Amino acid sequence: MRLKDLPEEELFLQGSAACQGCPGSMALRVAFKALGRNTLLVVIASCISVLQSPFPVSALDLPVLNMAFASGGAVASGISAAVRRLKKRGVFTEEPTVLVWAGDGGTYDIGIQALSGAAERNTNFIYVCYNNEAYSNTGTQRSGATPYAAWTTNTVSGKQEWRKDVAQIMVAHNVPYVATASLAYPMDFYQKMQKAKSIPGTKYIEILAPCPPAWKFPSEATVQVSRLAVQSGLWLLYECENGHTHYTSGTARLIEGRSSAKPVEEYLRMQGRFRHLFSPEKDEKRVGEIQERISGIVESLKFTAKMREHIMDLEIMPRP
Amino acid sequence: MSAKDKRKNVKAEAEIGFVTTISFPSVGSAGQTGSWRIFKPVKNEERCNECLLCWIYCPEACITKKLSINYDYCKGCGICAVECPRNAIQMVKEEKQ
């Protein structure tokens, strides 16, 4: 599969109310290309509710249901049940895909209860969380996804806690498909969306969305920042099918040793939300803490991959 | 129907006392967003090798797959110029009209 094989049809229309360099609209475009027109979209309160722009027009060329913060999983369960019933009656020739699009606030903090319930019932839908690591829509308040030492309006000298990992929480739900994606690797994201479409049951995909106004970097650097997050090992790209995790594109190269990890400092320096770590003087302690944690994770992944290869070579276990 | 016509339609409906509460998809739902732009992307045809990276990275769908730029709605974010591997897109300052 190559870039030129992607469909030309645009379901995200030009002239929306999104900011310049918006990661949300960029991710929506690729997702719509993968899912096609036969999709029912549920939008949880986030920037995506805003960028559709004011009544009577909308920038999304799909049936859209704008819903309250806490209801992502619940609404999808209802729509999915209706779709199943209508299919039985023979209303559809082809079953539509139910897609929930939520931000990190609607997933990590407010929406996790409904999402967990829907995942436990194994409702047939795709849940996409576009994670910009703060409540950017309402003016950058801290969320459960905000990383350590990042500035938000409630954590002026940097957040003191580490972020939680909802993708791993979803893996623990034993759902059929969990994946993480990055804007800098659109083909990887496209293939993951297509795979999610083909699998019945609950699918969870999380995409890192560097937000220019909230993270405080120039609008043209959205893709650069996403790429650096993967190359430094801060954001891991993987997909987990029925409990078997394997790493993809940038992260796979990092773990197999085909590319060396970039220093985290390069990623932090690009963003204004980490400026207090570097001016007036560099905060060696906190930058060191972040680097140590990231290197630890990457090293342990490298070790696990090596051990797995070693066990495979011994031929105790059958190769998958 | 353009976004402007749809807004007019709603006004006409309101006068009769009936308004549909569903939004309909339309290009330019937030107006001519090209007016937000300070820098304008200009493509150099000779350098371009049609890798399509600008097409997939454009957040506003303003670069078509045939690689023509729609200046009516391009917000001038500059992602295409930064991501172009052959520097075929340059950001040029807009002139006052």
Image (cartoon, coloured by chain):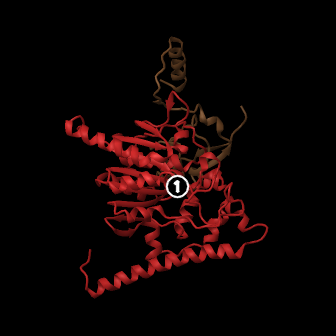
Quarter-of-image position of residue A306: bottom left
Callout 1: few (<14), some (14-19), or many (20+) C-alpha neighbours within 10 Å? some
Chain in red, by letter, is A
Please give the chain letter of the residue carrying mark 1.
A
User: Is B55 on the left-hand or right-hand side of A98?
Assistant: right
* Residue B79 image point, x, y percent: 58, 51
User: Is A87 on the left-hand or right-hand side of A45?
Assistant: left
Residue A307, above or below A159: below
**Kind of element beneath mark 1:** helix
- Quarter of the C terminus of chain A within the rendering: bottom left
Which residue is disc 1 drawn over? A109
Q: Please name the residue shown 44% across and 82% down the image.
A: A303
Quarter-of-image position of residue B72: top right
Note whether residue B40 is visible. Answer: yes
* Residue A200 image point, x, y percent: 28, 53
Residue pushed farthest bottom?
A: A314
In the image, A87 versus A10, the foreground residue is: A87
- Quarter of the N terminus of chain A within the rendering: bottom left
Task: Give the residue type that dot 1 points to.
Answer: Asp
Residue pushed farthest top?
A: B16
Note whether residue B50 is visible. Answer: no
Chain in brown, by letter, is B
In the image, A139 versus A190, the foreground residue is: A139
In the image, A239 versus B49, the foreground residue is: A239
Residue A88, above or below A124: above
* Residue A100 image point, x, y percent: 42, 47
Residue A227, above or below B75: below
* Residue A89 image point, x, y percent: 20, 36
Q: Please name the residue shown 68% across and 56% down the image.
A: A154
Q: Please name the residue shown 38% across and 84% down the image.
A: A307
